[in-house]
Amino acid sequence: MKLFIEIPIKHQTESQIDYQSKMLLLGSCFVENIGKKFDYFKFQNLQNPFGVLFQPKAIEQLIKHAIHGNVYTDKDVFQQHDIWHCFEAHSKLSGLDKTAVLHGLNSALKETKQFLETATHVVITLGTSWVYKHLDSNIIVANCHKVPQKAFKKELLSSDDVLHSLQNIQHLIASVNPNATIIFTVSPIRHTKDGFVENTRSKSHLITAIHQLLEESAMNTLHYFPSYEIMMDELRDYRFYATDLVHPNQIAIDYIWEKFTASWFNNSTTSIMKEVQIIQSGLQHKPFNASSKEHQKFLVNLNKRITAIQEKISGINFSV
């Protein structure tokens, strides 16, 4: 008996992800869910240097500023309730000291540029087509930073607007790293605060634009991974959601991760991941008696495993 329809996942035979790959992950908070997996299994990656970016214009702006070597100055930040913010970045880069905030923004730009120039894969997860335009400056912001809503106009990007932004992102990345593989996904997290109908409209614009880009592009470096479709169709039950009934829970995240690895990793990589998992479990083990002979033997064997995998994969570090 078949209890659900499984979405077919294409196994990539080119540009696979392995332990020599270097990945830049940008976009919705779903990036951080998958990013934690990359961290746990010790892949080289950089996640959201500007914090969570929900909409394509914000991601485009970050990439453009990074590649063009722009520098943030006093005019690019503002103070709200004693905290300095930048409309183009998440609040994780905000702070009480203006100089420190500007330093953090510019350091994040440099780090983004370095990763863009050397990344083998760029994973971009789009969350919404809804954007907020700041009325005084007439710019679309990445984050409103709890500035009163009357200061903004809420707008829905059309699928053409999203397509144009994605084309710009593609061209910008190709200008510094033409061999980078770009993987687009749509976040499975529903933006229910916009409204249920509005969320559906928003996601449909994202999906339409991504597939139009893939169909029109002659490049084989563009791909789509159906994380949104997996959540909506294979995991269409509230038992796969967190208590807010909006975000996927850990079971769903693990399931989508397994689908992603099945698509992008080869057997050699998954074999190394199993060894990394054994080491990670060993490092998290808390003994009843740390001085016992059994535990000392356990530590010796664990260190042997770490040494063996470090000899196989240069740069892998289990101390962080």
Image (spheres, rainbow, N blue to C red):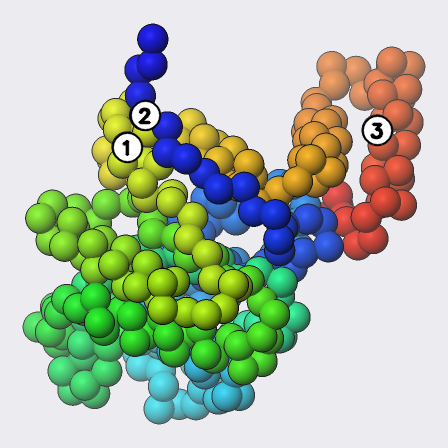
| Residue at mark 1 to residue at mark 3: CA–CA distance | 41 Å
The answer to whether the residues at label 1 and label 3 have Cβ atoms under 8 Å apart is no
In this rendering, the label closer to the viewer, 2 or 1: 2
Residue that numbered label 2 is attached to: 5
Q: Is the residue marked by circle 2 packed among few (<14), some (14-19), or many (20+) residues within 10 Å?
A: few
The residue identified by callout 1 is 233
Dot 2 amino acid type: Ile
Tell me the residue at 37%/34% (across/down).
7
Tell me which residue sits at (45%, 31%) in the image. Answer: 255
Q: Report which residue position mark 3 lands on.
A: 302
Do the residues under discs 2 and 1 have CB atoms within 8 angstroms? yes
Q: Write the residue at 91% across / 27% down.
A: 300
Q: Earlier in the sequence, mark 2 or mark 1?
A: 2
| Number of numbered discs overlaid on the protein picture | 3
Q: Secondary structure at mark 3?
A: helix
User: Is residue 83 among the parts visible in the rendering?
Assistant: no
